[in-house]
Amino acid sequence: MKFLIADDHELFLQGLEFILRKEFPNAEIVLCSNYKAIFETLDKQTDFDLIISDLAMPGANWLEALGKIHRQCPDVPVIIISAVFDREILQKTYDIGVSGYISKSFPNSIIVGAIRLVLAGGIYIPPELLRMGMQNQPEMFNLLLKDAEEAPKNNGDNAAPETEKPTDLTPRQLEVLQCLAEGLSNKQIAYKLGLSEGTVKIHITLLMRALKVNNRTSAVREAMKRGILNVEEYR
């Protein structure tokens, strides 16, 4: 496991490093204090499993910086951890392809949970984003709202066992699932289906949750096992 973490506040950077070393004791961690240091690091190495970065740092405009990071490491998930929690900013970061946005005020357990979710191939959406809404991206907002409303609830002894619940994928999620079976990247799926990469990531997260798996390969395998995908088509 290899992390790149960046923040221009030394105390917070050291605190985040401490959390990661506690949760991932064998991980290699590279520290950066600004965007310039991130770019210099990525010029030499791009084999990171995750990049965690503050938003407003010296060295570049955050919007241009995130775009550059994404171009240099298109397959490396990026989590933003910031004190800034503005609706428009959150929308823009997810549209660029960020895999998670975490407030610095969140407890350590939430931060660690979000990191593990993203490492498993998911996308972390802060609850505050649902309450604020995403007016400029109605499809993405509807996906998030649907996920929040349909999240499994404990209804007591009368609730149906987990294994008896049918798999309920939307037509769009089925399209994304078929693209995963074809081995397409998020960028390729976004282009093929006319979506943003952020929206593709949300679809993948929701279908993985529905299939009760934690990565893309397992999602395809489970879908074939359940007969959702035709095995013969992908042999």
Image (tube, helix red, strand yellow):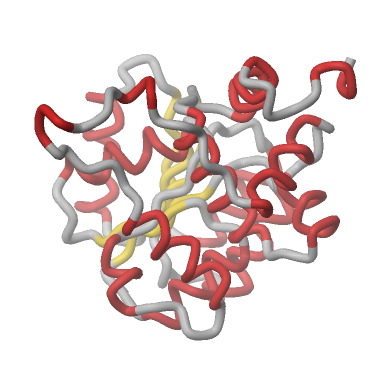
- Residue 164: image location, x then y, percent: 38, 23
Q: In this picture, is 104 found above or below 128?
A: above
Front residue of 64 and 125: 125
Task: Write the residue at 21% across / 43% down.
Answer: 153
Q: Residue furthest left?
A: 156
Front residue of 64 and 191: 191
In-image side of 175 versus 84 (left or right): right
In-image side of 127 versus 136 (left or right): left
Task: Write the residue at 84% across / 32% down.
Answer: 182
**Quadrant position of residue 45:** top right
- Residue 141: image location, x then y, percent: 47, 70
In-image side of 36 versus 5 (left or right): right
Task: Write the residue at 52% across / 72% down.
Answer: 62
**Quadrant position of residue 225:** top right
- Residue 160: image location, x then y, percent: 27, 28
- Residue 110: image location, x then y, percent: 22, 45
